[in-house]
Each structure stands twice: as structure tokens, then as C-alpha cells.
Amino acid sequence: MIAAVETIPATEVIGRRKGRWIDDWRPEDPAFWADTGARVARRNLIFSIFSEHIGFSIWTIWSVMVLFLGPKYHIDPAGKFLLTAVPALVGSVLRLPYTLAVAVFGGRNWTIVSASLLLLPTIPAAILVHPGVSYTTLMILAAVTGVGGGNFASSMTNINAYYPQRLKGWALGLNAGGGNIGVAVVQLVGLAVLATAGATHPELVPTVYIPIIVLAALCAALFMDNLSEARNDKRAMRDATRDPHTWIMSFLYIGTFGSFIGFGFAFGQVLQVQFKPEFKTAIDAAYLTFLGPLLGSLIRPVGGWLADRIGGSVVTFWNFVLMAASAGVVLLASQQKSLSLFLVGFISLFVFSGVGNGSTYKMIPAIFRAKAALAVTGGAEAAVVEREGRRLAGALIGIAGAIGAFGGVLVNVAFRQSFLTYKTGDGAYVAFIAFYAVCVLVTWAVYLRPSSRKLTGV
């Protein structure tokens, strides 16, 4: 049961209750939104993006660190792919408890904690990564960076509660896109270290982030808020797992976000292994690895924006078609050993995965809004079903984020196995094409068929 919410003006509650709790939050009320809601939501969105951005950078920091692991570290390409698969795995697992943490502790409070936890992988890495370190130590250090992967789920769940339905696609896309840029930024930090200090100082990459992490935690403490209604959603995760759309959307999110984060981890290594003559040193690859994640991150809000206007299922369907085509270009370029065509295809994969990230997340609240409308038609009370839809949508965002992130593990494992078996990434590219084709069929069958669209409204 959802507890009653007090009707105390948010502007009074923020200053009166310890811990910056807001008891009255009505984003669907136009007067409330114009007077108070938009300003408060925007402030929380800004600092949520900042913290999530740093989380993504720390989560994917080993996509950069492996570029520093030269012959003195005695690690082959297969071993490096494992070093990038482990953070993806840990991050995907942590996304579920991070989603629940918002309901238990509050969005602001948990942002402070989750930002502070980013110090756990950065401080040891700044001290321990040097020639002679054991592979086991590196694996542990890489695994701990998974705490950065959880930040996305808690941030998205928190921001979802702040915005009205008509702005969720834009807000969630902006929040996620700003966070995703952290993948590109950490690679730019790595490039800067390589260009100035050389490939013998990997410890400088995590060192750069230590004061920024402290700043993110302080900003969350000073400028963010907690929503009381989020504390009433403790059973939302369990209830959401009973809805078939939870598993369908999670599967589709493997294809979009799983691709984005998996390619973000693997792109630099793939270039170095598959095009050795062109990328003889780490800095040669570092000049290019940030481009795909940067473009994929910047385009994510556009996916949400398009979904707001023409429908999330339409955007997602055609996006998977284009992802399959892009993977086909990458496969052709690999077989022809064409670096320029390879870069075009791979960067296109990043771009379309970013668009798909925005459109699939827009579909989640839209699905529950459509179900709420059907319930109202059947006689249910509008306010009750609307609140229930927001509750389940928030839980589904966390579940889909966790399962989608696991796609990053699959991408790195696919590359590792392909290079071990075929000495190229061709086997992985074929697998990607097949998976995107399945996603096209699923999107059409569940959300685009005329009978399905009447039910889901997305």
C-alpha cells in the first residue's frame, strides 16, 4: 500500500525538515510545476548528472587503463578483455540494489553515498598500478570500479520521480546522456596523460578523479533533495518483475545500452588488436577511442526527444535496423581491412546505441501511462493508478538498467572469444547483427503491431 502524502508546500518543507526532504511533490499539477516543481527538479537534475557522469568515468576507467598495460605487465589481449568485462559485470549487478537504495535512503542521501564510494577504486588504483603488479590485483581493482556502474540506476530512478510524464523523455535522456559522456571524458583524460606523461604513468588517470569525486559528493549534499514519496516504493521492484513488459524492455535495453557500454569498454582494445600496423602505441588508439562514446552520449537526449514526438517504439524499431546495418558495415570493413570504413561503422554503432538508449527509456513510463489510462477507463481512480504507474516505472528503470548493463559483459566476452578463435572480431560482429535483428522483430511484435499499439500506446 502507498502511504498518504502530506500536502505541505515544497518550498517550506525543503527548509524545515532535516535532510532536505520534500513531502509534497505534484509534477503533473501545472500550477505546482510552474511555481516550484520545475526549479527544484532542474536543480536536482544538474547535480544528479554531475555525480552520474563521474560514476560512468570511474566505471569505464579500465577501458583506458588497459591501454597503459604494455609488455612489462605481461597481459595478452584476452586478459585485457577480461579486465574490462569484470567492471561491466559488477556494475550490472549493483544496479539493482542501487535502484532500491533511492527508496530506502532518499535520492539526495544516496547520491552522497554513491559518489563517495567512487573513492574505493580510485585511491588503490592510483597507488598499486605499476609494472610487477599481479594480474589478480588488477582484476580486483577493475572489479571494484563496478560501483560506478550502479550510479546510473539510482540517478535515473530518482530523476524519473521529479518530472511530469510529458517531460520524462527529455529529462531522462538528458540525465543519462550527461552521465554517458563520462565514458568519453575518462578516455580524454587518458589521452591527456599519455600525451603529457607517457604510457608509464597509469596511476595519474585515477588520481585526476579523486578531488572531483569529493566535489560531486559535496554538491549532492548541498544542492539536492529527497522525495518522501519515493520511500513508499519498497515493493515496487517485486511488483515490476511480474509485468512482462519489464523483461521485454530489459531485453531491448541490452541491445542499446549494453552495446554502448560494451563498445565503450572494448573499442580501444579492438583497434589495437585488429589494426596493429596503424595503432602501434597506446596514444595512437587513444586519439580515436573517445569519439564514439562522446557522440553516443550527446545523441541520447535526441532519442528521448524523438520518442516524445513520434513514439518510442517507432524510434526504437528503426534504430535497431540501423544498428544491424552499422554492424554489417563493421563486418565488411574488418574483412576488407579498411580502417576508415571500420571507424565509420563503429562510430555509427555508438551513435545509434545512444539514440536507442533515449527511446527505450522513454518507452518505460509511456507503457505504464497507457496501462493507467486503460485502468481509468475501466473505472479506477486516476490519481491512484498514476502514482502506481510512476512507482512501477521507476522500478523498471532500475531493472532494465541492470540487465542492460550486463550486455556490456556479453560484448567484451564476445570480442574475447572471437579474437581467440578467429584472430579478428568477425565472429562478434556476426553475433551483434543477429541480436539486433531479433530486437527489431521483438519491438515490432510487441509494440508496433496495430493490436499491440492499442494496448501499450508507445
Image: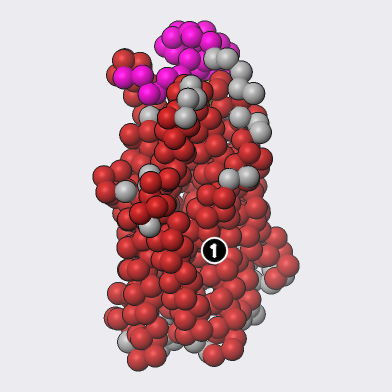
Residue 281 horizontal side relative to residue 84, left or right? left
Kind of residue indicated by mark 1: Gly
The part of the image, by quadrant, that contains residue 174 is: top left
Rendered residue at 57%/53% (across/down): 247
The part of the image, by quadrant, that contains residue 417 is: bottom right
Residue 288 to residue 332: above or below: above
Q: Secondary structure at mark 1?
A: helix
Q: How is the image coloured?
A: secondary structure
Rendered residue at 42%/30% (across/down): 377
The part of the image, by quadrant, that contains residue 89 is: bottom right
- Write down the region rendered in magenta: 6-30
Which residue is denoted by mark 1 in the rendering?
A: 408
Q: Is residue 39 visible?
A: no
Rendered residue at 60%/42% (across/down): 240
Q: Is residue 102 visible?
A: yes
Q: Position of residue 303 (x, y in %)?
A: 32, 51
Q: Position of residue 72 (x, y in %)?
A: 61, 78
Residue 59 horizontal side relative to residue 195, left or right? right
Residue 58 horizontal side relative to residue 440, left or right? right
Membership of 14 in magenta stretch: yes
Q: Position of residue 119 (x, y in %)?
A: 61, 45
Q: How many marks?
A: 1
Rendered residue at 54%/77% (across/down): 415
Q: Position of residue 248 (x, y in %)?
A: 52, 55
Residue 150 to residue 344: above or below: above
Residue 160 horizontal side relative to residue 138, left or right? left
User: Dot 1: few (<14), some (14–19), or many (≥20) neighbours within 10 Å?
Assistant: many
Q: What type of secondary structure mainly makes up the magenta span?
A: loop
